[in-house]
Structures are given as structure tokens and as C-alpha cells.
Amino acid sequence: MQDLEIYIRDLASGAVSGWLANHVDELTLDDTEGNGVVKGSALYEGERLSIALYPGAFGKRFTSLVIEGERLPWNSDLDCARSAWRAMDTEIRCSPGDWKEGEPVEDEKWWRLDHRGEHQVVWN
């Protein structure tokens, strides 16, 4: 099982399902409310994907999007973030990919994609 995880700032209602519908098949994700955890599924190249939205991540303005499956539409969190940013035009953040569970994150650099471009930043 592989996963992708990105963080979307000020997520608009329906934005994730609108974006993902162009990349996966048989999408079931009701992200119109956005008041709590939302779970859904889709198919990608015939493989089932699990999709989850977790609002209130990192200071309440960000929603965490996690996509899990054997095959994924993007090769990395950054590729996923780039696609999401182009579709949603709001700040997207993701891990640079070298962090491992259990390692300290105090000096962790994150990718931030927004109207200023792509930059590695400390979250705060």
C-alpha cells in the first residue's frame, strides 16, 4: 500500500472531488460540507483507492488529503500537490518526502505551492 498526503489551505466546498474526478474513475467523495472527516473511494488503473479528508490540520486553515492504494495517479506528494494547486488555486503544502515516522519535525521543511511559486519552508 502506498499513500500520498497533501495539505490544502482554505479548502473550498467540492474542490477536491472536482479535481480528482479528472484523474480517477468511479469517484465517490462527498466533500460539499467539509465540517468533519470525509472518506471516499475511487478506481485508478483498475485498483481501488481510499481517499480521506481531515479538516483542521496544522492550525485549522488546512485540510489534510490522504490517498492510499496500490497504484496512485501521482508518483510523489509534490507531483500531487502541483496538480492540486493548478486545479484549486489555493496554497498547497506537502512533505519533501525524506521524513520518516518517529523523526523530529521541528526543523522540517515543507513544500509550499502558491501564487509565489514553489518553495521549501518551515511550516510556521
Image (cartoon, grey):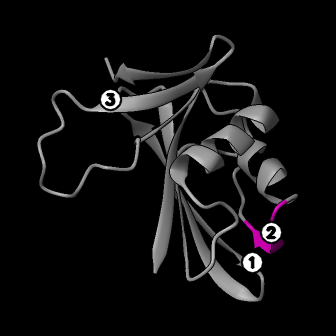
Task: Determine the CA span between mark 1 and mark 2.
Answer: 5 Å
* Residue name at image x 78 percent, y 34 percent: 86
For label 3, the crowd category at 10 Å Cα-Cα, with few meaning under 14, some 14 to 19 and many 20 or more, is some
Measured from the top left, where is residue 60 in percent x and y? 41, 29
Residue holding disc 2 = 24
- Viewer-closest of 28 and 106: 106
Measured from the top left, where is residue 82 in percent x and y? 67, 39
Q: Which residues are magenta?
A: 23-28
User: Is residue 73 left or right of 102 when viewed as pictured?
Assistant: right
Measured from the top left, where is residue 88 in percent x and y? 76, 33
Residue type at mark 1?
A: Tyr
Label 1: state its secondary structure: strand
Foreground disc of the pair 3, 1: 3
- Viewer-closest of 1 and 51: 1
Label 2: state its secondary structure: loop
* Residue name at image x 76 percent, y 42 percent: 15
Asked whether the beta carbons under mark 3 and mark 2 sit within 8 Å of each other, the answer is no
Residue holding disc 1 = 44
Residue type at mark 2?
A: Val
* Residue name at image x 56 percent, y 83 percent: 70
- Viewer-closest of 74 and 26: 74
For label 1, the crowd category at 10 Å Cα-Cα, with few meaning under 14, some 14 to 19 and many 20 or more, is some
Task: Determine the CA span between mark 3 and mark 2.
Answer: 30 Å
Give whichever of discs 3 and 1 has the lower sequence position: 1
Residue holding disc 3 = 109
What is the residue that sits farthest to the bottom in this orientation?
Answer: 46
Task: Determine the CA span between mark 3 and mark 1.
Answer: 30 Å
Vertical side of 89 occupied by 24: above or below = below
Label 3: state its secondary structure: strand
- Viewer-closest of 44 and 26: 44
Give whichever of discs 1 and 2 has the lower sequence position: 2
